[in-house]
Image: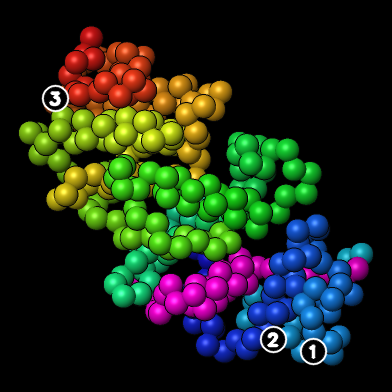
């Protein structure tokens, strides 16, 4: 887990953020930003840059490399700090709370506004950059792609999907977005993988999930990463979350990805609740019904 940077925010001064922004600007063109470019990028004098670099390095917000030239790059914590400052300046959040979830590609925290919300930091590319660059179409054509860019593009894509889908589809309500971070409503309920459904609930919950997939398709999106880890089950129904890999329905592989999503979620229910599920489901016919907005119940596709 990446260190929580909220604890050092109060120690930072405006000029520290100028320095961090200058490093961020330089990282658009190279992984390591030459020290000589930082005064121009940040709007600080050379002497002030020296002072601010020391402050930011002490707080582990930037890293230094001196192999070929003296270069600097943001740490994950430095990028987090820039996003947090923007949210605070917009009055989107007033307080920072406990972790809500930590995954391979994101960290989620509770934040305080007029009511508790969730802050999601995208981490795509930070620990598995080569894999993400190969798999995500928003990075595949770029020659210089940093993890900052990869994470930011993932957040942009997810926020765009949430704005399009909410409220017609049961997804977290989007609130704000900056860089690699999203502010959204907290999830209602428990992750499907951790839920223990009663026998009489199983078919109904699966039908709710498949119905949300149909509504999303009608609204123009395929989730493309559906699993028991991306659905929350609560008293008011189900919520489908984690949309950074979503693709529009006019994507060349949209129908293939829709069928894979249906196969994944039906497969999970068959493994966990075999006594309440049909022995076999016609996934092709099921995905056709979802795409055609004709889905009513998974029982209709039992083989």
Q: As drawn, is 7 to the left or to the right of 277?
A: right
Mark 1 / mark 3, whichever is N-terminal = 1
Q: Secondary structure at mark 1?
A: helix
Could you tell me if residue 260 is visible in this image? Answer: no
Q: Residue at x 34, y 53 (%)?
A: 172
**Magenta region:** 69-98
Pinpoint residue 31: horizontal percent, then vertical percent. 78, 59
Look at mark 2 in the image and give the residue it sits on.
Answer: 15
Q: Secondary structure at mark 3?
A: helix
Q: Residue at x 65, y 68 (%)?
A: 75
Query: In the rendered view of the protein, which quadrant contains the C terminus?
Result: top left
* Residue 183 sits above or below residue 78 on the image: above
* Residue 80 sits above or below residue 267 on the image: below
Q: Residue at x 73, y 79 (%)?
A: 19
Look at mark 3 in the image and give the residue it sits on.
Answer: 275
Query: Was residue 92 drawn as part of the magenta stretch in this picture?
Result: yes
Label 3: few (<14), some or many (≥20) within 10 Å?
few
Label 2: few (<14), some or many (≥20) within 10 Å?
some
Could you tell me if residue 156 is visible in this image? Answer: yes
Q: How far apart are the two marked residues, 1 and 3, measured between alpha carbons? A: 68 Å
Q: Residue at x 55, y 73 (%)?
A: 86
Q: As drawn, is 203 to the left or to the right of 12?
A: left
Look at mark 1 in the image and give the residue it sits on.
Answer: 48
Q: Marks 1 and 2: in contact by CB < 8 Å? A: yes
* Residue 31 sits above or below residue 168 on the image: below
Pinpoint residue 20: horizontal percent, then vertical percent. 69, 75
Q: Marks 3 and 2: in contact by CB < 8 Å? A: no
Q: Residue furthest top?
A: 303
Front position among marks 1 and 3: 1
Mark 2 / mark 3, whichever is N-terminal = 2
Label 1: few (<14), some or many (≥20) within 10 Å?
some
């Amino acid at each position: 887990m990446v260190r929580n940077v909220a604890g050092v925010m109060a120690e930072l001064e405006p000029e520290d953020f100028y320095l961090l922004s200058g490093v961020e600007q330089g990282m658009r063109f190279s992984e390591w930003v030459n020290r000589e470019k930082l005064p121009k990028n940040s709007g600080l004098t050379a002497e002030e840059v020296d002072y601010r670099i020391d402050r930011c390095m002490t707080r582990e917000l930037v890293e230094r490399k001196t192999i070929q030239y003296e270069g600097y790059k943001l740490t994950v914590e430095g990028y987090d700090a820039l996003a947090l400052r923007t949210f605070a300046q917009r009055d989107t959040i007033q307080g920072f709370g406990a972790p809500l979830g930590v995954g391979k590609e994101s960290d989620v925290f509770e934040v305080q506004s007029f009511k508790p919300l969730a802050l999601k930091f995208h981490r795509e590319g930070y620990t598995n950059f080569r894999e993400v660059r190969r798999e995500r179409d928003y990075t595949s054509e770029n020659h210089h792609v940093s993890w900052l860019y990869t994470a930011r593009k993932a957040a942009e894509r997810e926020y765009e999907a949430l704005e399009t889908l909410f409220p017609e589809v049961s997804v977290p309500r989007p609130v704000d977005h900056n860089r690699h971070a999203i502010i959204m409503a907290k999830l209602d309920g428990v992750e499907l993988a951790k839920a223990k459904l009663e026998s009489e609930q199983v078919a109904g919950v699966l039908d709710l999930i498949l119905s949300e997939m149909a509504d999303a398709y009608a609204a123009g999106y395929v989730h493309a990463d559906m699993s028991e880890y991306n659905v929350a089950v609560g008293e008011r129904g189900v919520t489908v979350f984690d949309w950074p890999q979503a693709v529009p329905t006019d994507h060349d592989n949209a129908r293939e990805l829709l069928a894979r999503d249906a196969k994944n979620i039906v497969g999970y229910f068959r493994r966990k609740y075999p006594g309440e599920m049909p022995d076999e489901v016609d996934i092709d016919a099921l995905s056709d019904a979802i795409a055609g907005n004709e889905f009513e119940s998974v029982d209709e596709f039992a083989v």
